[in-house]
Amino acid sequence: MNSRIEIIQPSGILDGIKGNHLRREISDILEKGTDILLIDLKEVKFMDSSGLGSLVSAMQIAKTANTKLFICSVNDQVRMLFELTKIDRIFQTFIDQEDFKRQVLTTM
């Protein structure tokens, strides 16, 4: 199986404004067609509830498009936000892109 993979790497503070940009970017990518979408949060220094909402929306958009969505490189603040809101039960996260490749791509 030859899966098409796209990687998005937001940076800085993931808030309402950047979250809206992220949703638009994801919608554009999914319209072009992809099988797997990885959101690499390595460069995200802080995320607020609006940023979290954008990730939840991204998951819904991906699900509608029959695309698998994964997240990697989550810092401590984002991890705490995920755990407090129990979003960590929804998203499959990986340590980094290498971990993602090792666990997901080798099983395809």
Image (cartoon, rainbow, N blue to C red):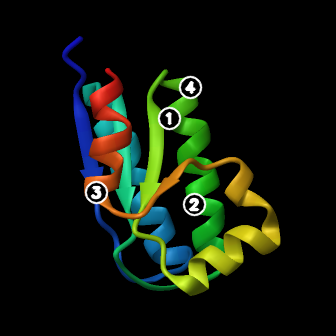
Q: Does label 2 or label 3 sit earlier along the sequence?
A: 2
What residue would you read off at disc 4? Answer: 64
Say which quarter of the image contains residue 2.
top left
What residue would you read off at disc 1? Answer: 62
Disc 4 from disc 2: Cα separation: 15 Å
Q: Identify which residue is drawn at 44% across, 28% down.
A: 67
Disc 1 from disc 2: Cα separation: 12 Å
Q: Does label 3 or label 4 sit earlier along the sequence?
A: 4
Q: Does label 1 or label 2 sit earlier along the sequence?
A: 2
Disc 3 from disc 1: Cα separation: 19 Å
Q: Identify which residue is drawn at 72% across, 58% down.
A: 87
What residue would you read off at disc 2? Answer: 54
User: Callout 2 environment at 10 Å: few (<14), some (14 to 19), or many (20+)?
Assistant: many
- Residue 17 visible in the current orientation: yes
Amino acid carrying label 2: it is Ser
User: In the visual, does 13 lie left or right of 50?
Assistant: left
Disc 3 from disc 4: Cα separation: 24 Å
Q: Does label 3 or label 1 sit earlier along the sequence?
A: 1
Secondary structure category for the residue under label 3: helix
Where is residue 39 shown, x and y percent of the image? Answer: 38, 56
Q: Identify which residue is drawn at 49% across, 21% down.
A: 66
User: In the visual, does 29 lie left or right of 13?
Assistant: left
Label at residue 97? 3
